[in-house]
């Protein structure tokens, strides 16, 4: 009603007397003014009042939601305009009401922008004015007006033709009847106007419709004024599936946000109760016992070969011969003895070592420890027996006993050869893995062979000795006894080492690897708590700002609490399902931390961009609509990468279990972010609405009451009230005590005045300026303080005023591009040096028995490989000379313990032919060779198969043992040797295979580790390509895919240069890096690509302000949380720290440096503004024309 009163009382005579012009243009200006003021009754403020002027939501919820969605288009449009005089961007949200009025009322105004502003006045207009600059009031309105495009043939790529992206927020409708709209071009002659009037008058309307028709006829009845009716129902227009899905998802999240905001208590308490209930299941906490199943490929040819070998020659019976330094089946105790000075073969050290052997042999354990049923078990009862039921001991012990016995009896000391020596019973034994650091009598310390005399052959000295005690574990009781014996074994060695400091003892048992692998979790407990504390402090600082009301420090802690509750819930689910834990799970909290913190900071950033005069429910709904679509997309990307890596396609059990657990944790974290954290945002929103302190929840006094307080109190309670921060005194829908309810019958005396200008160009091309003065139904307050309270946020202010301008500076861009080229170069350097890490000791805690034992092993026993079993698993014609030559050729170059070679030498020594008939060959083998004492042990290496009555059996299967000479790259050489012998077995006439228990770790380890990473990366690229067809802009998918590839390439290359091998832990970090980099870069790309402005640089700055700041906050907290973990003395945590730190660093470089720079000159393109010369000419003309016009300031009446 006030708007209509203004129209009736306005003095618009100046339209006819100020500047000579045709009547049609004068009436057109009147129509613009009338339409402008009528539209104010339906803008974002006027819509809140009913017909009586009372504050009432008389629109339906669906209408409000649709209206809000439509207005966002106009907000984004005007945010993209940059006013050169002010040096600032137009604030579309602040000027929304006037922009809607301009779009709704302007029809024939073309040169209204002819105004001249001083820079100071222009900046004040941007910061405090409710209207957009006059130039953009016309450009913005006319670019949304289809009739204008067609009348002036504006091309689709021009600024004045927005095409399908044009915005229209309000459609006039009279009593439910939609007014007709002409589908043809608007004609500017009187015939078109008369035809339109006749069309209207020929239509039957109700009484209510006649009022609308009369108003429209009044506006178009001026001579020469063109008219055209608008059809207000939705136009039939083909919309892409992407737009439909995007709009539907945003609407759904908007409704979800309102629902969560309407029930905050439930959504805050339900996650807490659920976490407490599931947290009680930690009584079922279990640790994974089988480390081999975690760290070895699940499906490999080595395991199949091992099963075949087990069926022929049980590994448990021959593990003393099939030695492995990496993994040995069953229970055992092993110790490496080294000397500080001298040799272990010196008489003093030799006697001490044999004394240690006897103590271990006589050591007993009691199981159970107390009670009447306790029994004492010694090594002789637990040991692995041979065929004569005698405990199997190392051959080096027998050789040392022979040396000691000879020295006591004053006999000549037997020669100890290396690596194969001959014992007193004539048996040849391989001692290369039992004696280390060997020096001989030959040149350069080489060990001479036999035949050179006792003085010059054999071992001269040895620095290390390795002893192994094999146990048998039959049933659960014996396994428990063996476990206790291993603990007593380690304790006995520790005690013996204290008594004999000249010897170094490095023990290892079958459970050492498992214990030391899980010990990383124990060491990381306190550092993880420290990480949580450091991250909490930084999260509080990142959420704080100078304004105590708008500061949200508690939201930082609540975000960490939400992540902690989700982790507790996921752990409870795992406990209830019987899952086990292992140390690789230490990386899961950081996966959750990066994803959860980013979502929380994004929500907080979006909250600060919402209007403060809105109800908390509306603000939360706007946050959900703005953030949750992107956050859900990044969550889906996390789940896609982790889910595919957790599928049966993954051949590494540790990777599969980690990704499965991480996917569960990410899902629960996402749900808790929607529920718990969002409800906390609602509570803090009500505190902000009530002007309560963000930290102490105390109501903040008004400025007039703070003047009498001390300076520290004023600083602590500093805030800006709504009348200081908003240019319009919009009613507070929350009902805050500080906001005064509107009274439609009152008019505030402090009415701020501003200018409405409507211009039209006549047919002759002359420009005319029209000014109007009218009261506006909003009060405008001016303040000397900063009208943007969010600028008091330190990071946001730095990015907005400093970093955004610096990173997009023309002179900085070449250096950023050069930095990216350096990044790619070093990444490629490391990528070409990637090595696999199949050694499980690289995943255990430092300074543990496994690490110390492995170091001693590599130092003293790296000259020879583990003992390789060469198994001939089918019957072969061993008596055939060609077969004999082939087998001897295969074993050539190896140190070998071969029954075939010994048998052929045996036949040669007896002057018998090695090529005999099958019966003779087998008979001599069974009845002569194997019955010799020195060859009797070869009976374990041959399996005979009966043929029939009276016939000699066949040799069904046999084995020989090979040992290869190796260098420092022992594991790489073993992998090459394994592949070479396997290829040879495919072409050989003799069917054979090779096996060692350590092959289960080496066989196809690189493929098993890297395949989950490749699958996850391909899945992400496929998901991005598929989503570009439906939800995401194609350019966003392209840029995000390239960013993920670049980050992965950099992390992989730099971690190699940092000394990290490609093992299961580093691959887990690389898989999680895909989601982390998508979290950081995705919103920035979406914000830039979705922007419609005049310059790439401006939209890069906007994207940095909106999404770069949350990414920076997340990276700060995330990086600080990694620092305590890097101090843990564990190889696993060191790998975790290095990979995650590189992930954070590479993601930060791409999000804050590379992408903002590259997007300024690479696609997607933005529409360009006028050149500087053209703009200068326009400004000059405007200045001349302004001298001839009379400015009349609008009178604004406040509702």
Image (spheres, helix red, strand yellow):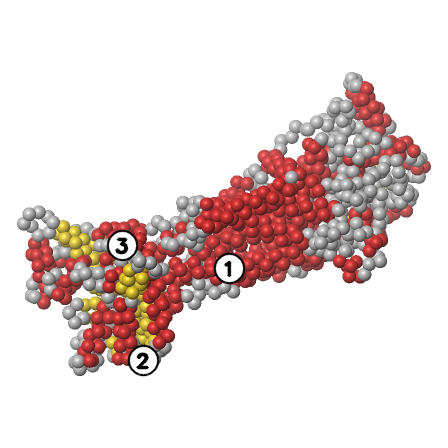
Nearer the observer, disc 1 or disc 3? Answer: 3
Can you name the residue that lies furthest to the left here?
950
The residue under label 2 is 342
Image marks 1 and 3: residues in contact by CB distance under 8 Å: no
* Residue depicted at x 48% and y 50%: 282
Few, some or many residues within 10 Å of mark 1 (<14, 14–19, 20+): some
Kindly indicate the quadrant of the structure image that contains residue 776: top right
Residue tagged 3: 474
The residue sitting at 34% across, 69% down in the picture is: 492
Q: In this rendering, which labeled residue sits more in front, label 1 or label 2?
A: 1
Q: Is residue 980 visible?
A: no
Asked which secondary structure carries label 3, the reply is loop
- Residue 1151, percent across and down? 60, 54
**Which residue lies at the image location 54% right of the left edge and 47% below the top edge?**
276
Say which residue label 1 marks.
525
Q: Residue at x 78, y 35 (%)?
A: 48
Q: Nearer the viewer, residue 1075 or 678?
A: 678
């Amino acid at each position: 009603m006030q708007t209509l009163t203004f129209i009736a009382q306005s003095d618009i005579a100046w339209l006819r007397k100020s500047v000579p012009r045709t009547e049609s243009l004068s009436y057109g200006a009147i129509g613009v003014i009338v339409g402008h003021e009528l539209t104010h009754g339906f803008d974002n403020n006027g819509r809140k009042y009913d017909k009586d002027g009372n504050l009432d939501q008389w629109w339906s919820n669906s209408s409000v939601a649709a209206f809000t969605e439509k207005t966002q288009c106009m907000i984004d449009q005007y945010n993209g305009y940059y006013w050169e005089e002010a040096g600032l961007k137009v604030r579309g949200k602040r000027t929304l009401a006037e922009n809607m009025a301009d779009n709704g009322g302007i029809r024939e105004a073309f040169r209204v922008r002819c105004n001249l502003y001083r820079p100071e006045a222009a900046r004040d207009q941007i910061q405090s004015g409710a209207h957009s600059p006059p130039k953009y009031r016309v450009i913005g309105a006319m670019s949304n007006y289809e009739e204008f495009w067609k009348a002036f043939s504006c091309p689709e790529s021009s600024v004045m033709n927005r095409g399908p992206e044009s915005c229209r927020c309000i459609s006039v409708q009279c009593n439910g009847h939609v007014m007709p709209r002409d589908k043809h071009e608007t004609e500017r002659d009187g015939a078109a106007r008369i035809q339109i009037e006749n069309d209207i008058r020929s239509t039957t309307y109700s009484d209510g419709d006649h009022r609308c028709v009369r108003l429209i006829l009044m506006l178009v009845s001026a001579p020469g004024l063109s008219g055209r009716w608008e059809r207000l129902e939705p136009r039939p227009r083909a919309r892409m599936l992407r737009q439909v899905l995007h709009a539907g998802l945003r609407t759904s999240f908007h409704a979800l946000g309102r629902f969560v905001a309407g029930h905050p208590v439930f959504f805050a308490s339900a996650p807490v109760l659920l976490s407490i209930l599931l947290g009680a299941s930690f009584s079922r906490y279990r640790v994974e016992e089988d480390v081999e199943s975690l760290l070895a490929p699940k499906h490999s040819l080595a395991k199949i070969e091992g099963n075949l070998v087990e069926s022929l020659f049980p590994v448990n019976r021959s593990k003393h011969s099939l030695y492995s330094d990496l993994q040995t089946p069953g229970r055992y105790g092993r110790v490496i003895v080294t000397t500080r000075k001298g040799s272990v073969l010196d008489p003093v050290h030799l006697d001490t070592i044999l004394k240690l052997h006897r103590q271990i042999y006589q050591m007993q354990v009691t199981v159970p420890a107390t009670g009447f049923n306790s029994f004492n078990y010694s090594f002789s009862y637990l040991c692995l027996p041979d065929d004569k039921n005698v405990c199997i001991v190392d051959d080096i012990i027998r050789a040392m006993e022979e040396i000691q016995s000879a020295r006591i009896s004053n006999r000549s000391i037997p020669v100890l050869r290396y690596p194969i020596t001959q014992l007193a019973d004539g048996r040849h034994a391989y001692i290369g893995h039992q004696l280390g650091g060997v020096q001989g009598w030959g040149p350069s310390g080489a060990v001479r062979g036999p035949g050179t005399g006792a003085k010059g052959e054999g071992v001269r000295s040895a620095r290390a000795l390795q002893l192994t005690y094999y146990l048998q574990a039959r049933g659960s009781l014996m396994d428990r006894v063996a476990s206790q014996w291993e603990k007593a074994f380690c304790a006995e060695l520790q005690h013996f080492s204290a008594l004999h400091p000249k010897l170094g003892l490095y023990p290892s048992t079958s459970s050492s690897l498992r214990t030391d692998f899980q010990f990383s979790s124990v060491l990381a407990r306190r550092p993880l708590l420290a990480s949580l504390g450091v991250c909490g402090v930084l999260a509080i600082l990142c959420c704080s700002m100078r304004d105590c009301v708008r500061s949200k420090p508690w939201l930082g802690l609540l975000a960490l609490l939400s992540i902690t509750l989700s982790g507790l819930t996921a752990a409870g689910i795992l406990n209830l399902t019987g899952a086990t834990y292992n140390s690789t799970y230490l990386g899961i909290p950081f996966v959750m931390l990066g994803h959860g913190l980013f979502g929380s900071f994004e929500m907080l950033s979006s909250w600060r961009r919402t209007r403060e005069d809105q109800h908390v429910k509306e603000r939360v709904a706007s946050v959900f609509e703005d953030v949750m679509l992107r956050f859900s997309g990044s969550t889906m990307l996390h789940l896609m990468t982790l889910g595919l890596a957790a599928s049966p396609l993954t051949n590494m059990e540790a990777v599969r279990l980690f990704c499965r657990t991480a996917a569960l944790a990410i899902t629960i974290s996402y749900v808790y972010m929607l529920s718990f954290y969002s409800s906390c945002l609602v509570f803090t929103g009500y505190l902000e609405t009530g002007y309560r302190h963000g930290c102490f929840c105390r109501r903040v006094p008004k400025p007039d009451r703070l003047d009498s307080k001390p300076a520290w109190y004023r600083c602590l309670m500093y805030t800006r009230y709504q009348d200081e921060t908003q240019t319009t005194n919009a009613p507070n829908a929350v009902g805050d005590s500080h906001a005064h309810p509107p009274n439609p019958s009152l008019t505030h005396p402090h009415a701020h005045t501003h200018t409405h200008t409507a211009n039209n160009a006549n047919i002759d091309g002359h420009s005319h300026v029209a000014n109007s003065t009218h009261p506006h139904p909003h009060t405008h307050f001016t303040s000397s303080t900063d009208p943007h309270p969010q600028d008091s946020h330190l990071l946001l202010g730095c990015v907005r005023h400093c970093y955004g301008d610096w990173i997009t500076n023309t002179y900085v861009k070449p250096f950023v591009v050069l930095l990216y080229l350096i990044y790619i170069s070093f990444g490629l350097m490391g990528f070409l040096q990637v090595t696999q890490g199949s050694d499980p000791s690289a995943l255990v805690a430092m300074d543990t028995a496994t690490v110390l034992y492995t170091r001693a092993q590599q130092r003293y026993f790296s000259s020879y490989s583990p003992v390789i079993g060469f198994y001939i698993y089918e019957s072969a014609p061993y008596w055939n000379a060609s077969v004999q030559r082939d087998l001897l050729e295969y074993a050539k170059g190896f140190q070998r313990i071969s029954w075939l070679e010994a048998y052929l030498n045996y036949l040669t020594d007896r002057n018998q032919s090695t090529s005999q008939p099958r019966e003779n060959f087998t008979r001599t083998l069974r009845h002569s060779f194997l019955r010799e004492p020195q060859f009797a042990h070869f009976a374990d290496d041959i399996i005979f198969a009966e043929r029939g009555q009276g016939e000699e059996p066949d040799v069904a299967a046999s084995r020989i043992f090979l040992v290869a000479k190796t260098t420092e790259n022992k594991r790489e050489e073993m992998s090459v040797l394994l592949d070479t012998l396997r290829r040879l077995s495919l072409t050989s006439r003799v069917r054979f295979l090779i096996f060692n228990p350590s092959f289960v770790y080496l066989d196809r380890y690189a493929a098993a580790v890297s395949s989950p990473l490749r699958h996850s990366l391909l899945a992400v690229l496929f998901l991005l390509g598929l989503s570009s067809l439906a939800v995401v802009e194609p350019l966003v998918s392209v840029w995000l895919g390239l960013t993920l590839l670049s980050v992965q390439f950099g992390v992989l290359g730099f971690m190699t240069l940092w000394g990290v091998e490609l093992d299961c832990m580093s691959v887990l970090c690389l898989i999680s890096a895909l989601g982390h980099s998508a979290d950081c870069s995705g919103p920035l790309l979406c914000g830039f690509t979705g922007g419609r402005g005049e310059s790439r640089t401006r939209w890069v700055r906007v994207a940095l302000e909106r999404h770069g700041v949350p990414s920076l906050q997340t990276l700060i907290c995330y990086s600080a949380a990694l620092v305590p973990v890097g101090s843990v003395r564990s190889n696993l945590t060191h790998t975790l720290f290095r990979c995650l730190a590189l992930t954070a660093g590479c993601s930060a470089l791409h999000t804050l440096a590379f992408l903002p720079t590259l997007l300024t000159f690479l696609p997607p393109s933005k529409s360009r503004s006028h050149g500087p010369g053209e703009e200068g000419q326009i400004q000059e003309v405007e200045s001349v024309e302004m001298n001839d016009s009379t400015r009349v300031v609008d009178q604004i009446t406040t509702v």
